[in-house]
Image: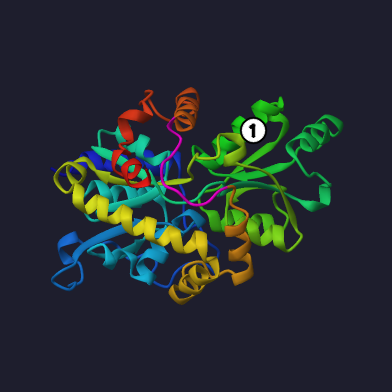
């Protein structure tokens, strides 16, 4: 049974207040299908009789490429699904649509299911979205800083100059900074944290020099690195673990319990798409360009794929996820510590990847 309207309201307020992710793209990278209010799943476009229609909510980040390639390549159709993608401008709306039964699958930052669970939404995360090392912390090259170690030295030698960091409050893009700086022994007040409510504004602020450090996602960080404007200080694979996700695939518990074959078919479609990306990234990029998903230069997208720390797989490191959740509790972003093992049910994807 879908959550009550009151519950949806609580979810949306928590998700928006704590994360406030907005479109993961610049004006050149927002898909043309963007920002339509999702309709009821029963209103989905008619698919061929042999295909099961499902709706998949998403933002735009590199680790969502398997979803997009799966749609463009026919991987989902090969597994019996007619997947309709629904673009959201922020993860709170994505989460709320899943909770209300307007979409069947949601691809969102891995912190969002925990906000949902804290609001009583019966959510289950079934896989990583498909990509590792997607979150990156980059710094303007004018400072000559090439690593977190260099940054530690810069801060020590320039105590009167606080670098400005663009991030999102309560999001993994903030938590990666907290853990990276804690590990390096850099005091939190050594920087001026500039909190944004959308990624477009963050990218623009970094581009024009309003902030010095950007915590963001590929392929948008890749644009600055390949142009020579910025250097990567660290990423989520380095700060947490190689298999710590950026975003994850979630469903409602009744979907997993009552329609496990649909969940399995969806994950098989993602695996099929990942095989294309892993073995023939040029072909994957051609499909992504046809779909107009990222709207970045093809060489930038290729670099983003080629600099992933490992091939795309879908089983996340739950121990690493748990350490981030514990930090969310410490920072009072969620009310209680929800074990990652209670939110994640990865039995299907583990079986597929054996």
User: Is residue 244 found left or right of 148 in the rendered image?
Assistant: left
Q: Extreme front residue here? A: 354
The quadrant of the picture occupied by the C terminus is: top left
- In the depicted view, which residue is nearer to us: 78 or 64? 78
**Residue shown at 41%/64% (left/top)?**
68
**Residue shown at 75%/40% (left/top)?**
147
Q: Is residue 297 visible?
A: no
Q: What span is colored magenta in the figure?
A: 310-318
Based on the picture, tell me whether residue 312 belongs to the magenta stretch.
yes
Find residue 159 and report its image quarter: top right
Find residue 112 and report its image quarter: top left
SS class, disc 1:
helix
- Indicate the position of residue 105 as horizontal and vertical percent values: 29, 52
**Residue shown at 63%/61% (left/top)?**
303
- Indicate the position of residue 304 as horizontal and vertical percent values: 60, 59
Find residue 209 and report its image quarter: bottom right
**Residue shown at 34%/29% (left/top)?**
341
Name the residue tied to disc 1. Answer: 180
User: Is residue 188 found left or right of 154 in the rendered image?
Assistant: left
- Indicate the position of residue 113 as horizontal and vertical percent values: 35, 39
Based on the picture, tell me whether residue 201 belongs to the magenta stretch.
no
User: Is residue 166 found left or right of 185 in the rendered image?
Assistant: left
Q: How is the image coloured?
A: rainbow
């Amino acid at each position: 049974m879908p959550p009550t309207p009151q519950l949806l309201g609580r979810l949306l307020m928590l998700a928006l207040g704590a994360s406030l992710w907005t479109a993961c793209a610049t004006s050149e990278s927002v898909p043309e299908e963007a920002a339509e209010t999702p309709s009821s799943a029963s209103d989905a476009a008619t698919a061929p009789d042999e295909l099961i229609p499902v709706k998949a909510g998403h933002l735009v980040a590199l680790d969502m490429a398997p979803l997009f390639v799966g749609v463009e390549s026919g991987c989902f159709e090969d597994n019996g699904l007619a997947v309709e993608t629904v673009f959201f401008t922020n993860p709170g709306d994505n989460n709320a649509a899943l909770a209300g039964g307007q979409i069947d699958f949601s691809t969102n930052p891995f912190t969002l299911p925990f906000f949902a669970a804290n609001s009583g939404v019966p959510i289950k995360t079934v896989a990583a979205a498909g990509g590792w090392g997607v979150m990156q912390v980059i710094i303007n090259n004018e400072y000559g800083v090439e690593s977190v170690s260099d940054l530690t030295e810069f801060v020590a030698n320039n105590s009167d100059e606080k670098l400005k960091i663009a991030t999102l409050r309560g999001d993994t893009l903030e938590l990666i900074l907290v853990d990276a700086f804690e590990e390096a022994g850099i005091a939190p007040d050594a920087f001026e944290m500039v909190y944004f409510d959308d990624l477009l504004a963050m990218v623009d602020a970094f581009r024009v020099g309003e902030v010095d450090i950007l915590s963001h996602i590929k392929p948008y960080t890749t644009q600055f690195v390949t142009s020579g404007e910025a250097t990567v200080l660290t990423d989520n694979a380095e700060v947490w673990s190689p298999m710590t996700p950026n975003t994850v695939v979630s469903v409602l518990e009744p979907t997993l319990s009552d329609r496990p074959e649909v969940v399995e078919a969806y994950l098989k479609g993602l695996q099929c798409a990942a095989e294309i990306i892993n073995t023939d990234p040029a072909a994957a990029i051609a499909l992504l360009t046809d779909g107009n998903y990222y709207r970045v230069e093809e060489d930038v997208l290729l670099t983003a794929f080629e600099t992933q720390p490992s091939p795309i797989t879908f089983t996340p490191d739950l121990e690493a996820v748990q350490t981030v959740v514990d930090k969310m509790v410490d920072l009072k972003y969620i009310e209680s510590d929800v074990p990652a093992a209670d939110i994640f049910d990865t039995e299907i994807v583990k079986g597929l990847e054996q």
